[in-house]
Image (cartoon, rainbow, N blue to C red):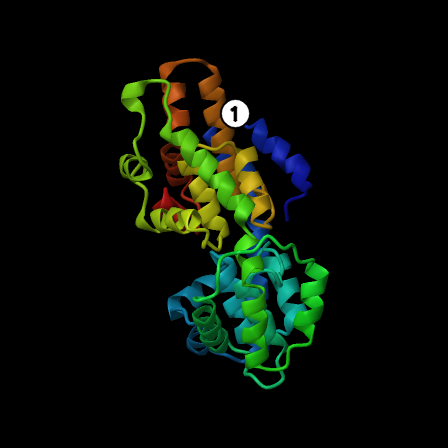
């Protein structure tokens, strides 16, 4: 296991002088996270008696994905940890502990539409506690909310909502609850949306009139944004996006944010900041710091790096050849 605290390790990354030092001396110390997950997922399969094929069917993923997990490959999204939790049969308390301990994700939150439906399934005494049932109910609730009006200005306390949620008995009550608090669901990420749009506006500007972008479409096209991130921005502009950690980080890099700005996005999404004990996020932190150092040198190359930070970070990740970094590299 890594013998250093997160704070000390962050300092080591900040003062790392080269990619070779990062690759050979620092990142190897982070193997403990993969080992911890490998031990956990293999214990889960041993305790439940499921084969890789059976577990894959329950999680609605491929059998090779489960085999990769068994070898220490980390699930790549909060949703994937939810699928695993459902497959194991966790209750609400166990699911929240699993999300925080192994996924480093926020626990289920009653002011999030997806989370509240997930919580309802996990607490129900009548429904099967499966990911498939969760998706089915989520589809029903979303359909019922399609005709609900725009968000109101009323501010509902989380404690009040949680108390009413705890009294729900069946799907009909869940739908009525979701309809009542539809404005709350839509307001949950408003500050995150505004923050992202502000950076979009900044990226459309340029001190050189000839380099200014006329639209987000032009910005995304010239920056070679993948379709998944373009969809995220479309959802942000329509105030419908439910953020995922990897997409937040990818967006931040495409919008040329430094680590403090990316961390602010993560905070507004109710997530933990960039984690220096995760090899991929540690590499991203180092790459951003390296880009800052080059830029502070005042040369043309440094300026170009900060204007195309995603490309710079992508090249660093490719050089490091980190396990499980492919999903992020594809977004960059």
Horizontal side, residue 41 vs residue 168: left or right: left
Would you identify the image quadrant in which residue 68 lies?
bottom left
Disc 1 marks which residue? 17
Q: Vertically, is 289 above or below 175?
A: above
Horizontal side, residue 6 vs residue 220: left or right: right
In this view, the residue in front, 134 or 64, is 134
Is residue 120 visible to the viewer in this orientation of the structure? yes
List x then y, in percent, for residue 301.
36, 19
The residue located at (52%, 59%) in the rendering is: 78
List x then y, in percent, for residue 26.
56, 37
Q: Vertically, is 177 above or below 151?
A: below
Crowd tier of the residue under label 1, counting other residues whose Cα lies within 10 Å: few below 14, some 14–19, many 20 or above? few
Is residue 279 visible to the viewer in this orientation of the structure? no
Query: Which residue sits furthest bottom?
Result: 126
Q: Quarter holding the C terminus?
A: top left
The residue located at (47%, 67%) in the rendering is: 145
Helix, strand or loop under label 1: loop
Would you identify the image quadrant in which residue 216 lies?
top left
In this view, the residue in front, 277 or 137, is 137
List x then y, in percent, for residue 75.
49, 59
List x then y, in percent, for residue 20.
46, 31
């Amino acid at each position: 296991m890594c013998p250093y605290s997160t704070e000390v390790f962050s300092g080591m990354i900040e003062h790392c002088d080269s990619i070779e030092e990062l690759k050979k001396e620092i990142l190897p110390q982070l193997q403990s996270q993969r080992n911890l997950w490998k031990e956990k997922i293999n214990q889960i399969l041993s305790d439940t008696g499921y084969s890789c094929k059976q577990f894959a069917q329950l999680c609605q993923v491929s059998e090779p994905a489960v085999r990769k997990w068994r070898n220490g490959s980390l699930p790549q999204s909060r949703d994937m940890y939810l699928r695993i939790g459902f497959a194991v049969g966790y209750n609400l308390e166990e699911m929240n502990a699993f999300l925080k301990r192994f996924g480093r994700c926020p626990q289920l939150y009653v002011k999030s539409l997806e989370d509240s439906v997930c919580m309802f399934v996990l607490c129900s005494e009548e429904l099967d506690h499966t990911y498939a049932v969760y998706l089915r109910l989520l589809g029903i609730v979303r359909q019922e909310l399609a005709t609900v009006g725009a968000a109101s200005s009323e501010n509902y306390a989380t404690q009040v909502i949680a108390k009413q949620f705890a009294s729900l008995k069946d799907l009909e009550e869940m739908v009525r609850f979701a309809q009542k608090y539809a404005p709350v669901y839509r307001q949950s990420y408003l500050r995150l949306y505004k923050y992202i749009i502000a950076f979009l506006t900044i990226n459309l500007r340029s001190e050189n009139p000839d380099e200014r972008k006329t639209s987000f479409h032009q910005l995304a096209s010239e920056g070679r944004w993948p379709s998944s991130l373009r969809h995220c921005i479309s959802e942000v502009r329509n105030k419908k996006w439910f953020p995922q950690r990897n997409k937040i980080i990818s967006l931040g890099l495409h919008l040329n944010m430094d680590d403090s700005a990316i961390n602010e996005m993560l905070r507004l999404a109710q997530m933990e900041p960039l984690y220096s004990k995760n090899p991929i996020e540690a590499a991203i932190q180092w790459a951003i710091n390296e880009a800052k150092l080059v830029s502070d040198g005042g040369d043309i190359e440094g300026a170009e790096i900060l204007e195309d930070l995603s490309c710079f970070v992508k090249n660093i990740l490719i050089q490091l050849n980190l396990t499980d970094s492919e999903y992020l590299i594809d977004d960059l």
